[in-house]
Image (cartoon, grey):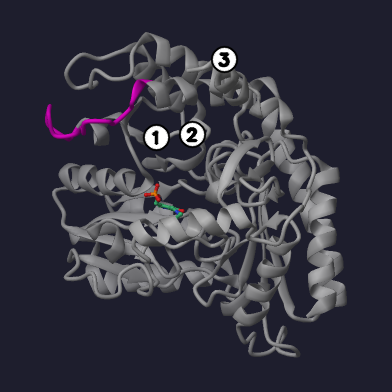
């Protein structure tokens, strides 16, 4: 590397000021040039919500190749929870790069993997003995959770909830609620996956007990507890639109699972790792999952995922039954250790609560002004608004995906990345990094307010 190049490439993070700045049209000329190159070599099946090409990022700001600075309210779908290029995370990863990059834990192991397993055991609900297997992605964690539950119970069936999202592998495609775009044309799919009704208070108006009775009736009649290996639930559904289930709903499901020998699996891939003002969303409901799935935020931006669970369940898999070449990669594991340290050092659970207050205050003000905001919901830095057709917020709650697209486009053009969600595409979700200051959030919400005014 030449000295000039070294200087240029080592400068970037220091130059990322925590402010929004738009200097070209969006996408800018350099992004457009890259996009043309990409379209020649990357298939359209891999699409991008906002084709601005990123040059560098820090904290809650991403900078594109044209020099535009965006307030990132998506954090790469809830991954850079501790902030982009968090200093402790990048230092830990860089340090590990100098030591070794790979050996394969199932050949010659290393401490970083063990330490992550210890930290997950310590920071997940319940004080029972726990074990963790590390893998590469959320979907792979779901796959392993199901494998382990089946081996432990000797049962075949897997139950999931309506509006769930669990991944893009063959098994997890069968577990998602939404066919398009995730599964359309990609079958045949794994069998023995059953979709039970969920709790979606804004739409079903049911209490937790009523919704749980409906779910349990389905599990008992349609599957039968004796054949059911596991129930997989997102404590707060992510892609589905940040639905917070009615009080007592998840507890009733967990109790039913325990009484019937069904493994209760919490998919905390999007809701976990300090996203909601607690380490895990399960804690808000007083749940102690048998298996807890983590991914996304656990390594601050590097690929890592885990299945953490009761020792007796996890130990059901025979030696050699679990693994994978890159699972628990040492660089990703070193980064994950630093993520746990960052959460403790910077009291990031409190930051999640601060962000919830800021987002809900501003979004509720908007709801008072605009009747197309049907509901403001979520916990911690996992907040969403559901948009409905004018005049239907208290009646039919007709999905308004057009308004969601228009608002996300307005935000993007003005330097704010806001993600969409929802089975009907009518949810705007906010999952900023915990480093996003109130000033930055206010600035982003001002942009959103202008978008509502322009609708
Ligand atoms: N479970 C609850 O949110 C990933 C999907 C991004 P992977 N959600 C973002 C996309 O469009 O592919 C997710 C999740 C929950 C499982 C997964 C899957 O995690 O790391 O994407 O495999």
Task: Give the Cα separation between the discs numbered 3 and 2.
Answer: 35 Å
Q: Identify the residue at horizontal 31%, vertical 63% (top origin).
A: 175
Give the labeled residue for mark 1. Answer: 304
Residue at the image position 25 percent from the left and 15 percent from the top: 109
Q: Quadrant of residue 446?
A: bottom right
Q: Is residue 275 left or right of residue 69?
A: left
- Say which residue appears at 67% left-offset and 34% top-offset: 349
Main SS, magenta region, reads: loop
Instruction: Point out the tag, 1 or 3, that comes first from the N-terminus.
Output: 3
- Classify residue 418 by image quadrant: bottom right
Please give the range of residues in magenta.
316-330
Mark 1 near mark 2, Cβ–Cβ under 8 Å? yes
Which mark lies nearer to you, 1 or 3?
3
Q: How many angstroms separate mark 1 from mark 3 (CA)? A: 34 Å
Tag 2, which secondary structure? helix
Work out whether residue 228 or residue 237 is closer to the camera in this orientation and state it. Answer: 237
- Label 3 neighbourhood size at 10 Å, few (<14), some (14-19), many (20+)? few
Q: Are marks 1 and 3 in contact (CB under 8 Å)?
A: no
Residue 171: mark in rendering = none
The residue at which mark 2 appears reads as 298
Q: Which residue is mark 3?
A: 3
User: Which residue extends farthest top?
Assistant: 99
**Image spot of residue 152 (x, y percent):** 19, 42
């Amino acid at each position: 590397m030449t000295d000039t190049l070294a200087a240029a490439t080592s400068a970037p993070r220091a130059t990322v000021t925590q402010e929004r700045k738009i200097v070209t049209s969006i996408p800018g000329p350099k992004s457009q040039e890259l996009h043309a190159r990409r379209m020649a070599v990357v298939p359209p099946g891999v699409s991008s919500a906002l084709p601005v090409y990123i040059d560098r990022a820090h904290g809650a700001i991403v900078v594109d190749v044209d020099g535009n600075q965006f307030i990132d309210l998506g954090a790469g779908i809830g991954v850079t929870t501790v902030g982009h290029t968090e200093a402790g995370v990048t230092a830990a990863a860089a340090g590990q790069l100098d030591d070794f990059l790979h050996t394969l834990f199932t050949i010659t192991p290393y401490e970083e993997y063990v330490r992550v397993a210890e930290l997950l055991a310590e920071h997940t609900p319940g004080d029972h003995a726990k074990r963790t297997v590390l893998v590469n992605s959320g979907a792979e964690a779901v796959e392993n959770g199901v494998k382990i539950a089946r081996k432990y119970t000797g049962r075949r069936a897997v139950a999931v909830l309506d509006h769930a999202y669990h991944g893009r592998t063959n098994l997890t495609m069968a577990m998602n609620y939404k066919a398009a775009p995730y599964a359309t044309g990609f079958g045949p799919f794994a069998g023995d996956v059953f979709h039970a009704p969920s709790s979606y208070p804004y739409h079903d108006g049911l209490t937790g007990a009523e919704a749980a009775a409906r779910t349990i009736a389905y599990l008992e009649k349609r599957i039968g507890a004796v054949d059911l290996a596991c129930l997989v639930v997102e404590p707060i559904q992510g892609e589905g639109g940040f639905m917070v289930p009615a009080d007592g709903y998840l507890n009733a499901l967990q109790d039913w699972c325990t009484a019937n020998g069904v493994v209760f699996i919490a998919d905390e891939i999007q809701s976990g790792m300090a996203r909601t003002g607690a380490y895990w969303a399960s804690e808000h409901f007083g749940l102690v999952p048998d298996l807890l799935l983590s991914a996304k935020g656990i390594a601050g931006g590097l690929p890592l995922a885990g299945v953490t669970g009761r020792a007796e369940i996890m130990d059901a898999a025979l030696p050699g039954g679990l693994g994978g070449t890159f699972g628990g990669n040492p660089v990703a594991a070193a980064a994950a250790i630093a993520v746990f340290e960052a959460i403790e050092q910077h009291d990031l659970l409190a930051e999640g609560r601060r962000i919830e207050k800021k987002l809900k205050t501003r979004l509720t003000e908007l709801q008072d002004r605009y009747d197309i905001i049907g509901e403001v919901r979520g916990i911690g830095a996992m907040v969403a608004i559901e948009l409905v057709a004018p005049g239907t917020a208290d009646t039919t709650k007709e999905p308004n995906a057009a308004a969601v697209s228009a608002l996300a486009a307005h935000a993007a053009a003005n330097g704010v990345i806001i993600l969409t969600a929802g089975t009907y595409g009518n949810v705007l979700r906010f999952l900023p990094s915990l480093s996003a200051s109130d000033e930055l959030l206010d600035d982003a919400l001002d942009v959103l307010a202008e978008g509502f005014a322009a609708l």
